[in-house]
Image (cartoon, grey):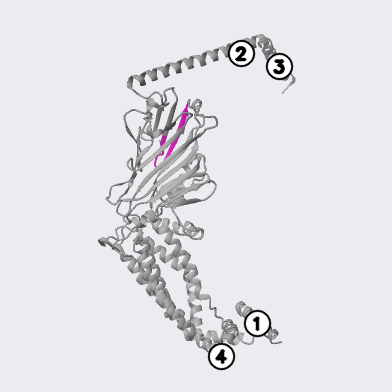
Amino acid sequence: MNRDTVIGILLIAGVIIGFGILNSPSQEELEAQKAEADEARAKAVLAETIKQNEADSIARVKADTLGLDTTALFGISMHGKKEVLTLQNELVKLNINTCGGVVEKAVLKQFKNQEKNPVVLFDENCSELNFVVETKTENINTKDLYFTPQVFTDSTLSLVAKGVDGSSIKIDYLLHSGSYMVDMTICGNGLERHFAAGNKSMLVEWNDTVAQQERGHLFEQQRSSITYKIKGDDTDYLRAEKAEEEELEETLEWVAFKNQFFSYVLIGYNDFKNVVLTTSPLEKGSGELSYYTARMKTSFDPSGKQPTKMQLYIGPNKYRLLQKTNLLSLDGRDLGLEELVYLGWPLFKYINKYITIYLFDGLTSIGLSMGIVLLVITLILKLIVYPATKKSYLSSAKMRVLRPKVEEINKKYPNQEDALKKQQEMMQLYSQYGANPMGGCLPMLIQMPIWIAMYNFVPNAIELRQQPFLWADDLSTYENILTWDKDIWLIGDHLSIFCVLFCVSNLLYSWLNMRMQRDTMAMQQGGQMKMMQWMMMLMPVMFFFYFNDYGSGLNYYYFISLFGSAVTMWFLRWRTDEAKLLAKLEENYRKNKDNPKKMSGIAARLKAMQELQEKQQQMKRK
């Protein structure tokens, strides 16, 4: 840039600045302009006040003409005609009544009830949601108000209830496309002069008689609950099968009225406080599971500057679907609605969350039937634990072939005071031969968490609902082939064939397992094991009375799992050459018999205890 250009730019800037200074208003002119603006603003406020007063007068005259109550703030909205408006998408249909302004009925289009009709999650005869606003002189209940629709489409609805002085309460709904999630906003307008100073809260009153959706009343009731999410913490619940009342000190993020496979969730983005929840179980045959109530407070700005934001989830308890609701969160928070699918305590929850669900999703995605999916999952889990099972069986086989040598040690130390020496010598024997007496417990330690994890997962997997397999028409509940009218003590009104097969396979597995353990023990221990065997054989019988009400899917899984375990045990015993195994152990003994350092940790501790005991006895003699 040359000198002439710079000089030109500076001259132009100087001209603009000078022109601005010369044309700027004086202080007197600025004050006059401010006075004119204040006068115009005052006139506008006065005109709005006059207009509002005229509207209030007209509303009161109209209310008086119609014989409506003008003493109540919302008296003119307490009379009207009920009108049902419908929000719907391809998944859900929601009926909203202008009397009360809340959802009174929800129909899930893609799910069928026992009569093969679309599932009705709740309706106006069993459910009520009411918002209570406390003013200086009265309580305003939205259930008593008739709202007027302002905007209405298949996915959006705006309802307004007006007060006699022009104030109003507005409720807006937005049903998301392809989702069970509904945005709900409650906004007051012009109510601040009726509220006590500092009062910015609203009471939420919610109750529902939860209908039975599945065949088994008790089984569904045991998996139904009021579930709630504590702010910044985990979820907790009140069980539907028990009469409970709980006053919560914690602040909640959401409350769900849940049955086995479906939930109605109220999510509060202004938080819920002073929460009181109750459950009252209902009898079998009533067609209902439990009566739920929830009373809680949330924020409400009477001026309308800060609307009360909520969301409703009205749909199935499907794990992956509930995870995706985070994408619709109004403030980006992790809603944690997937916790509605109970997966068990932490260890079992992690097994289900990171193993079972991935296997389940992968197998169902290729179109396999639910019965085959459970079979394949069982086979995969059996393959995973097979190396440990084989190692455990070999450990038990080693104990079995060493039994004669253990008997010799028992004969060597017949007296009770030599019990410590006997145990030490046995541990030394096992160590020198390369056997581990605790090795046989490993498969049980591995399989028990898996069995318990599946115990929690299968009854809560909505994918099994109304899925047929073999003679079962619905894997989520018991088979209805063998049923009768009156309950039989301890059995009920039906007999589950899969439960019978599960108990039979359990008997077989227990018999094989007990026989193997008995063969590994010495004579005295073997006699004690015979007594334990009879006790263990009673367990499958007890399981029958407990699991007869359970879903056929779970009984089917336990049946094939235990039957597979019995076959695996038989196969390993058939493949094991005990003569070769004993020869290998004898070779281990020859290598280790002259090595004093070859002592197991247990044997070393027993030896130390024995030496300490001998020293104490010597001191007593002195």
Q: Given the image, on which type of amino acid does mark 2 rest?
A: Lys
Q: Is residue 293 magenta?
A: no
**Residue bearing the label numbered 3:** 8
Q: Is residue 584 left or right of residue 57?
A: right
**Residue bearing the label numbered 1:** 613
Of discs 4 and 3, which sits in the foreground? 4
Callout 4 touching callout 2 (CB < 8 Å):
no
Q: Given the image, on which type of amino acid does mark 4 rest?
A: Lys
Q: CA distance from mark 2 to mark 3?
A: 39 Å
Of discs 1 and 3, which sits in the foreground? 1
Residues in magenta? 173-189
Establish if 361 lies above or below 134. Answer: below
Q: Is residue 187 magenta?
A: yes
Q: Could you tell which of marks 1 and 2 lies nearer the N-terminus? A: 2
Q: CA distance from mark 4 to mark 2?
A: 114 Å
Callout 1 touching callout 2 (CB < 8 Å):
no
Front-most of residues 174 and 229? 229
Establish if 292 lies above or below 307. Answer: below
**Residue bearing the label numbered 4:** 412
Q: Is residue 402 left or right of residue 33?
A: left
Q: Given the image, on which type of amino acid does mark 1 rest?
A: Gln
Q: Is residue 2 left or right of residue 113?
A: right
Name the residue located 56 percent from the left edge and 89 percent from the top edge: 413
Which mark identifies residue 34?
A: 2
* Secondary structure found at label 3: helix
Percent of width and height locating residue 131: 43, 36
Q: Residues within 10 Å of mark 1 (few under 14, many from 20)?
A: few
Percent of width and height locating residue 432: 59, 83
- Tell me the quarter of the image containing the C terminus: bottom right
* Secondary structure found at label 2: helix
